[in-house]
Amino acid sequence: MYILDVRELTKHFGGIRAIEDVSFKIKGGRIVSIIGPNGAGKTTLFNCLTGTTRSTKGSIRFKETEISKLPSHKIAELGIARTFQNIRLFSEMTTIENVMVSQHTRVRYDFLSVITRSGGFKTKERSIKEKAFEYLEFVGIEDYADTQADSLPYGSRRRLEIARALATEAHIILLDEPTAGMNPIETSEVMALIKKIQELGKTIILIEHDMKLVMGVSDRIIVLDHGVKIAEGLPDDVRNNPMVIEAYLGSETNH
Amino acid sequence: MLLQQLINGLTLGGVYALIALGYTMVYGILELINFAHGEIYMLGAYLGIIFLGLFTVAGLTAVSLPLALFLTVLLTIIVCSAYGFTMEKVAYKPLRNAPRLSPLISAIGVSIFLQNYVMLTQGATDKVFPQRFGDSGLQFLNVNMTYLQALIIIVSGVLMLSLHLFIQKTRVGKAMRAVAQDKTMAALAGINVNGIISVTFIIGAGLAAVAGIMVASYYGLVNYYIGYIVGIKAFTAAVLGGIGNIPGAMLGGIILGLVESAGAAYISSEYKDAYAFIILIVILLIKPDGILGKNTEEKV
């Protein structure tokens, strides 16, 4: 079943066409990579999918819901979460607090129980914390639970961002260059982590420049160039598609 | 003498701190100096007089004074919070993406509006708090702490501690901190940013309401312009502690109260209002980000 259905999505910034008539469908539980040269519109696409940027036109359907006009927090509540290319953590909070924040929409409580700090409230707060710790364990940074987020090592900050996205209990996780700035060993660890997330039944959309990673984990690849979708298919098809090669290397007639 | 000034200073400082929290919380989240916040405190003082007056007429104070006072405080908090909530929705929310000067001017407008609104509806003359608490109190070590002073110090302390726990420990408190640090990211984590901003205004107004009632009962008199000078001083307290920093506002308020009462006692009470600003200038020269403020660089 398709979990995400994007149709004729367009985003203009003034005269710049960041995304032009992009359509694609994504099946639940898959890992789909979005690749393309710099400035292809990949991050803008993520911004539109999460409500950070309002699309100029087109529709985005998540399950049965049209989300292109919804505010970010509603989209998060429905089940789409993301990470950023340039890591964005709540740097003045501890690692575990960063994850606890993400469970905001998943726990309901009433105001009275907070004022009185009654049993129900304490139990809920404790269960949030336990759950947050499980997410930290899942990505492998539980030892840093009480460390201030901005003093984490680089790789762990990336992992924390992923843990925070998972903690929203999203169905779709958007990862924006999760291996940027990492060495090959760290990259292969992230690759394993992405597979592990897929095993949870999540759908993953990945923006990535590391072709080895992309070819290794993707079930499907979408190629953007100058805001337009130029190819889509299985990794092998995309690898051998002349238009993709041209977008990356330039056309031979130009030389 | 010194101990006496300490008690007077703590009383005053607790009140400043409660109001300063409203300034600092709003600044932390919106980077807006809500100049109309002092007026919420003034409204709190008036509403306290109005509600307690009503209960006196209704005969409730004769039956149970503590119950009447409790209901007065509760109703005042509710009405002031409603004012705070409405203020944000009407005067600041439409300007969320405007240049930073626009909401500031809007805030000054709200302040002038509220002062004149109270002057027109309540009159320009002083109003008297309907209940006198007298000078009886605790005598120890040659000092006199009235029961009202003790109550003000305790209430301020309890409210500040509750707020601190609320912000550090609860889900909504964490959401408030998240919104203060990165609104876009907070929204992506599923936090309703506008909702959290409203909560911030409601809490700030509630604290100012309590401060208003306490001052009205302490001095016995209120006027429509009391919010101005106290507002400026509480804002000074917030800057002193490091604007945007919640423990800083508490500390700044208490320091300000202590300095003011010590200055009035040992130097001259003529310059009572000047001490606050002298200490502000000194702190800004030595540590421009305030006592607990961090060195913040402009976001890129």
Image (tube, coloured by chain):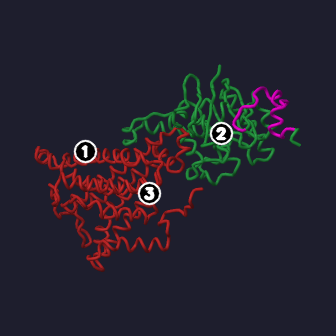
Q: Secondary structure at mark 2?
A: strand
Measured in 3D between alpha carbons, the distance from the residue under mark 3 to the one under mark 2, in whole angstroms, is 32 Å
**Circles 1 and 3 on the same chain:** yes
Task: Please name the amino acid that badge 1 sits on.
Answer: Leu
Residue depth check, mark 3 versus mark 2: number of the one nearer the observer: 2
Residue annotated with mark 2? A17
User: Element under label 3?
Assistant: helix
Magenta range is A226-251
Specify the subunit that label 2 lies on. Answer: A
Residue A19 colored in magenta in the image: no
Task: Supply the letter of whichever chain is red.
Answer: B
Dot 3 amino acid type: Leu
Instruction: Give the labeled residue for mark 1.
Output: B75
Q: Secondary structure at mark 1?
A: helix
The image quadrant where one finds the N terminus of chain A is top right
Number of the front mark, 1 or 3: 3
Residue B29 in view: no
- Crowding around mark 1 (Cα neighbors within 10 Å: few <14, some 14 to 19, many 20+) is some
Amino acid identity at mark 2: Arg
What residue is rendered at 15% in x and 60% in y? B125
Quarter of the image for the C terminus of chain A: give it.
top right
Question: Is the C-beta separation of discs 1 and 3 under 8 Å?
Answer: no
Q: Is residue A253 left or right of residue A62?
A: right
